[in-house]
Amino acid sequence: MTDTATAPTKADPKLHEDGSPERLAIDTIRTLSMDAVQKANSGHPGTPMALAPVGYTLWSKFLRYDPKHADWPNRDRFVLSVGHASMLLYSLIHLAKIEEIDADGNKTGKEAVSLADIEQFRQLSSKTPGHPEYRHTTGVETTTGPLGQGCGNSVGMVIAERWLAARYNKDGFTLFDHDVYTICGDGDMMEGVSAEAASLAGHLKLSNLCWIYDSNHISIEGATDLAFDEDVGLRFDAYGWNVIHIDDANDTAALSRAIETFKATNDKPTFIVVHSVIGYGSPKAGSEKAHGEPLGEENIRLTKQAYGWPEDKSFYVPDGVIEHFNGAIAERGAKLRDEWVALTDKYRGAYPELSAELDLLLKDELPEGWDADIPTFEADAKGVASRDSGGKVLNAIAAKVPWLIGGSADLAPSTKTDIKGQPSFEAENYAGRNFHFGIREHGMGAIVNGMALSHLRSYGSTFLVFADYMRAPVRLSAIMQVGAIWVFTHDSIGVGEDGPTHQPIEHLATLRAIPGLDTIRPSDANEVVAAWKAVLKDASTPAALIMSRQALPTLDRTKYASADGLEKGGYVLADSANGDGGTPDVILIATGSEVSLVVEAHEKLLADGVKSRVVSMPSWYRYELQDAAYKESVLPREVRARVAVEMAGSIGWDRYVGLDGATVTMSTFGASAPLAKLQDKFGFTVDNVVKVARQVMETK
């Protein structure tokens, strides 16, 4: 480890600038990264400095990418899973002269990342935030930062490419054959999500996936051998990957040979282990001090001196560097894209139906009549579990929307999310639509996001209690505004005998707390229909569908309001005297299985002369989008006697019941017993709801 007070040595011939276009570009990436972090007084300079040769080689010599068309569907994907090294990506985007496109895919006439943007690194409203953000900066393929997520996303992107190729490629028409490259680090390798994703990628033999592992043996606390000393290459060999070692990150020829080997490999993914020195060339080289803090003005001066770089220049891009770097990428990428566009034009004539389908897919639109065959459900006191009705609705939609694909974390027989009559997605059949993620909830979440980033309407499912295992990707789907669908079943103490380990209590509150996530808990089969319709219409809002294990009565919609009210998140389901009874005395609010319970309590109160109202509130997210007038029509401010009923924690319900209202909710974990016994124990009975309703009426 180099002492920070000692100037770098020039003895290493690789350290000093030789004036070649290659080396000028590499050192430009290094110095831009140093300068940006220093000006921001925040960031991670060491990894971009170490990996500049890797980024340069991959982008300039191999990446199939047209800087003028950053949304070309068959472009290679570059994922920076080590998102803290964002200045590496911003430098590459700038030097490649990627052109900015807006949310609708239109060119803005601006650079995706200008030199001025780099100078505003980590500043408010800049296009160069601390970690790369999808939609925020053109050229960023996914939001990264939480380590391991980019690794998982890349597996989803490769899966999407394999599926698209299997469905749309025809003899003489190769529309999809792109590769996905991911730069990952020691932190990614320690996170379990990357192991889950890598294991599945090896099983699926995803040969167009290449992870480049920056093995620098440094983390924030110091050398990685404080907690991590395994042979990662051997681990990936066991996963079924092709493992290649490169002793020096500066050896661009060796990296080129490794990538050529990857491109020639057709039966497994490739894992390139690159040994680097963090903060290469600086007084802090090889130290954790180069990882998460600026180098300091004097250290930057010494580093530039060691490089043979002008010491007095900041954010310096030598003449010819952009022309060299952009030229290498654009000459290759523009030609490939032009050929692809010409090919797709011919494809339209040869395969008009598939071409029209693909157009819809890439525009995140749905085919005409996609919801024509969704069933409706007759009133039924016995009813059906919402996981079962959800499975029926899913299958009806999947028959019309071929790119609605997904699976479960080994729970499809329980979550009812298999697509009937469709094969599994496996190494022998990439056209399959049923995915087996294995017992890998976290990996499943990251992979589903990667699929959604490639315009597939992807879903993943598991029990609600295991949402904790995949909270990071669920949260990231909301940050990225991608339409991933999360199907969570076994939604309450209704799980019964499995007991408190499998009975979610706090999970609804934690999902509802995620901004931009539409958490929907339908009350019966027809609300399930409305939920799936609402979710599919919006490809930029992720949704968590919360489904029951136990049967839910199917309400008589000729007597009660239409389930289409779900579109607004909350609606008046039942009212005193069919809505003609004036201001209600009490309002009962519920979601999911508890709606039928409060309907029974409502009927009992009506029979006793109480003006009662039932509000079904399946989606707080949607309800909060409504205007004040609508909200007032559902929950009038003057009615302060309110009761919320939900077999989950009470957190958040005060928003709707106020200081004078009450909740019938869970304040402890559940218990192992038949559902009826649990309902008695925890107060989820008609008599108790009526009792609480009368109490709030008396004390309002």
Image: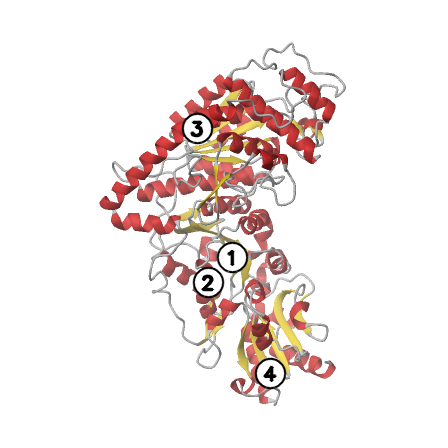
Residue on which the image places disc 2: 534
Instruction: Please tell me whether mark 1 sits on a helix, a strand or a loop.
Output: strand
Viewer-closest of 124 and 433: 124
Q: Which amino acid does label 2 sit on?
A: Ala
Percent from the top left, x then y, of residue 615?
57, 75
The N terminus sits in image quarter: top right
Disc 1 vs disc 4: Cβ atoms closer than 8 Å? Answer: no
Percent from the top left, x then y, of residue 416?
44, 58
- Residue 118 visible within the image: yes
Crowd band around label 3 with a 10 angstrom C-alpha radius: few (<14), some (14–19), many (20+) = many
Q: Which of marks 4 and 2 is in front?
A: 2
Relative to 25, 363 lies left or right: left
Residue on which the image places disc 4: 612
Disc 2 vs disc 1: Cβ atoms closer than 8 Å? Answer: yes
- Gap in Å between the C-alphas at discs 1 and 3? 38 Å
Residue on which the image places disc 3: 329
Q: What residue type is labelled 1?
A: Ala
* Rendered view: 422 above or below 43: below
Percent from the top left, x then y, of residue 412?
45, 53
Instruction: Please tell me whether mark 3 sits on a helix, a strand or a loop.
Output: helix
Q: Which of marks 2 and 3 is in front?
A: 3
Relative to 691, 408 lies left or right: left
